[in-house]
Amino acid sequence: MAAKNYRDLIAWQKAMDLAELVYKVTGRLPDEERYGLTSQLRRASVSVASNIAEGQGRFTDADFHRFLSIAHGSVREVETQLLLAARLGLLSHEEIDSAIELSAEVGRLIAGLARSLKPKA
């Protein structure tokens, strides 16, 4: 594995950008969503970067691959919740489109990183 530290991974850096963006846009959600979509979106977005970091800190590529799979699932969770916010008219199309685009990029980076590990079954 080329990266010596998770902070060197572009997937982690972009996942941090995604979490930051999610925090910004969820700050504009209605107060009644504080314990609903706001909380869920924030936790899911933080989970993406956290699982990349935790996986990179493990001792085997197989462990890293497993955590990348969890991170990839969290990306899909973020996307689903953003799409729900759009359906409910809680966020602007610009905010949603920007966050969806970034989440898709993060998903591609995670998938590429996982492919590079070639885990043993």
Image: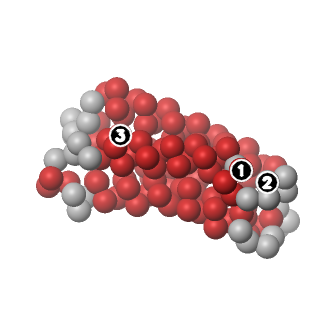
Q: Which mark is residue 83?
A: 3
Q: Secondary structure at mark 3?
A: helix
Q: CA distance from mark 2 to mark 1?
A: 6 Å
Relative to 53, does residue 31 appear above or below in the rendering? above
Of callouts 1 and 3, which one flags the residue occurring earlier in the amino acid sequence?
A: 1
In screen coordinates, is 18 left or right of 92? right
Which residue type carries mark 1?
Asp
Quadrant of the image occupied by residue 107 = top right
Q: Position of residue 45 (x, y in %)?
A: 45, 53
Q: Position of residue 13 (x, y in %)?
A: 60, 46
Which quarter of the rendering shows the C terminus? bottom right
| Label 1 crowd (10 A; few <14 / some 14-19 / many >=20) | few
Which residue type carries mark 3?
Leu
| Label 3 crowd (10 A; few <14 / some 14-19 / many >=20) | some
Q: Which residue is mark 1?
A: 8
Of callouts 2 and 1, which one flags the residue occurring earlier in the amino acid sequence?
A: 2
Q: Are marks 2 and 1 in contact (CB under 8 Å)?
A: yes
Q: Residue at x 23, y 42 (%)?
A: 28
In screen coordinates, is 113 left or right of 106? right
Q: Residue at x 56, y 56 (%)?
A: 49
Q: Position of residue 62 (x, y in %)?
A: 78, 67
Which quarter of the rendering shows the N terminus? bottom right
Q: Secondary structure at mark 1?
A: helix
Q: Which residue is mark 2?
A: 3
Q: Nearer the viewer, mark 3 or mark 2?
A: 2
